[in-house]
Amino acid sequence: MSVNPDLAGREFPPTAPYLVGREKVREFARAVFADDPQHTDVDAARALGYADLVAPPTFAMVVQDLTLQQLLAEPDSGIALERTIHAEQRFRYSRPIVAGDELTGRLSVTGVRAVGKGAMVTSEAEVTDAAGAHVVTATSILLIGGEE
Amino acid sequence: MTDTSTGSVAGSAELAVGDVVAERTVHLTRESLVRYAGASGDFNPIHYRDDVAARVGLPGVLAHGMLTMGLSVETIVPWLGDAGRILEYGVRFTRPVVVDAEQGADVTVRAVVGAVDDETARIDLTVQAADVTVLGKAQVRVRR
C-alpha cells in the first residue's frame, strides 16, 4: 500500500493531557547535553521568571510523537514505518515548555506530495497548555519510500 | 520571560552578522543513544542494534536525528541565557551521524549570527560529524 493522498487535510482529536514532570525534564536535558542550569536547577529557572524547570527546546517532540502515533495508527494511512525517514523538523514557540505543564497535542496533516514512488507527508502538531493557550507548533516532514 | 533587559549578550546592540556566538563538540557514544531513546521514547532499533541497522542497509547504528537537533540548539542556550528567547527552530536531516560501538562519534556545532533586525536575530548552526555537515538549514530565530 502506498501513502494515501486523502490524508491531506485530516485532523486528529487532541491527545490525552501529558503532564511534564520535573525529573523528566532533567532526564531529557541530560540526554540532549543541555548543561544550562535552567533545565536542571529550579532556582535558576525561577530566577528567569519561570514557575519550574525549563524544558530544552526539542522536548516538544515528546508530545508531537504522541500525535504522530495517531497518524501511524490510521488503518488507511499507507505509511510504513520501516520505509519512513524524518526529513525535516521545525518548532514555532509561543513560550518554552515548563515542568508542571499539562500539554495536549492536536495533529493535522497539511500536505501529502508524491515523490518518486513514495510520498512526503507534512504534519503540524499544535501543542497547547491546560488553559488552552498555544505553547508550540511542531511541524514534521516525513519521507516515505515507495515499495520496490 | 519576555523581559529582554536581563543583560544577556543576545540582547546586545553589537550583535553583527558573522559573529560566532557559541560552539562546542559533543562526543556521542552508544550509551548516549540509549539514554536519548529512553528520554524521548524513540526506541527504533536502528539507533542501538548493529544487526538491524545492517539489515535495512544503513552504514551503521545512527544517532537519532532529534538527538542531533536537540544537542545542536542547546549549544546556544547558555549564550541566550533564557531558552524562552527561542521563537523558532528548524532543521533538515541531510546526512546521518554514524556512531561506532567503540569510537563513538564527535558532533561539532558552530553558531553564527546569520541575520539581525530590530527585534530578532537568526542564528545559523553548522553541525558536522566526521567533517560532513549533517543538518541542513539549521536555523534558530531568537528574540533579541
Image (spheres, rainbow, N blue to C red):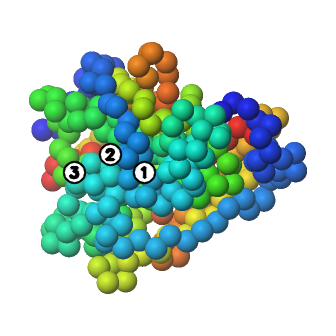
Quarter of the figure with residue B100: bottom left
Q: Is residue A73 left or right of residue A36?
A: left
Q: From mark 2 to mark 3, how far is it between C-alphas? A: 8 Å
Marks 2 and 3: same chain?
yes
Q: Is residue A17 above or below residue B137?
A: above
- The residue where tag 3 is placed is A83
Front disc: 1 or 2: 1
**Nearer to me, B19 or B93:** B19
Bin the neighbour count of mark 1 within 10 Å (Cα to Cα): few under 14, some 14-19, many 20 and up.
many
**Mark 1: which amino acid?**
Arg
**Mark 2: which amino acid?**
Leu
Q: Is residue A124 above or below residue B58?
A: above
Bin the neighbour count of mark 2 within 10 Å (Cα to Cα): few under 14, some 14-19, many 20 and up.
many
Quarter of the figure with residue A89: top left
Where disc 1 sits, the SS reads helix
- The residue where tag 1 is placed is A26
Q: Earlier in the sequence, mark 2 or mark 3?
A: 3
Q: Chain of mark 1?
A: A
Q: Is residue A128 above or below residue A87?
A: above
Marks 1 and 2: same chain?
yes
> Which label sits on residue A143?
2
**Mark 3: which amino acid?**
Arg
Q: Disc count in the image?
A: 3
Q: Report x, y in % for residue A9.
A: 33, 20
Marks 3 and 1: same chain?
yes
Which residue is drawn at the image coordinates 43% and 23% (left, top)? Answer: A129
Bin the neighbour count of mark 3 within 10 Å (Cα to Cα): few under 14, some 14-19, many 20 and up.
some
Which residue is drawn at the image coordinates 36% and 73% (left, top)? Answer: B29
Q: From mark 1 to mark 2, how far is it between C-alphas? A: 32 Å
